Image: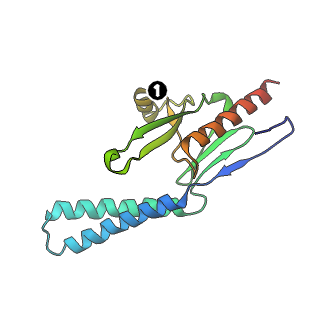
Amino acid sequence: MENSKDDNKTVLLKPDTRKWLLILLFAAAGVVVAQLSGSDMKGGVFGYWFVLVFGSVGSLIAAIQLIPGSSSLKLDRAGITITKVFRKRFVPWCECSEFKVWAVDDPYYWLFRSRSEFVLFSSGRSDRNAEANKKLFGEDDSLPDTYGMSAQALCDLLNEWRRTQIKFWEV
């Protein structure tokens, strides 16, 4: 990626909506199952309300993620802007550490042969979530999505932007 001093490029990455459509479908199916099983109460009242509440909340969150502008990653000369459920957070390039990929086997890895991959970095956050992330992963921040890219491709893109912009500000 070529960036010169007078270049003011901006990259806006949007989430992969196919993933959220699938989550919405499963959450909605959970709500339907709760409604259907509620008539005979074989799972008990607690099981019915548990599935109904969490299925409804899951459906709502998935639906919100499908709204344009609710989730994105914006890269520009100054830093990265992470938008999650319409809440924006800006992290300057100078506060970002090197970006890394963290891969975890899914619980049913033996069946699906799939892994979950995340992009991690340090940004100097000091809240409770940051402390927990630091203990678990060694970094205090992460991206909520890979925005339709592989985690490694996104990590490479972010590291290239970081190197280019830090060089720009040092000159």
Q: Residue at x 55, y 42 (%)?
A: 151
Camera sees residue 119: yes
Q: How many marks?
A: 1
Q: Position of residue 104 (x, y in %)?
A: 41, 38
Residue closer to the observer: 135 or 160: 160
Q: Which of the 4 image quadrants contains residue 82?
A: top right
Front residue of 98 and 84: 98
Q: Is residue 70 left or right of residue 130?
A: right
Q: Front-most of 12 and 69? A: 12
On the rendered image, what quadrant is the N terminus found in?
Answer: top right
Residue for point 26% across, 69% down: 33
Q: Which residue is mark 1?
A: 138
- Give, as a three-letter code, the residue at label 1: Gly
The C terminus lies in quadrant: top right
Residue 23 lies, in percent from the top left, at: 42, 60
Instruction: Please identify the quarter of the rendering in which residue 93 is found.
Output: top right
Relative to 158, say whether 55 is above or below.
Answer: below
Q: Quadrant of residue 158?
A: top right
Q: Residue furthest top?
A: 170
Name the residue: 30% across, 61% down: 53
Decide if residue 60 is in sight here.
no
Neighbor class of circle 1 (other Cα within 10 Å; few <14, some 14-19, many 20+) is some
Q: Secondary structure at mark 1?
A: loop
Furthest-right residue in this view:
6
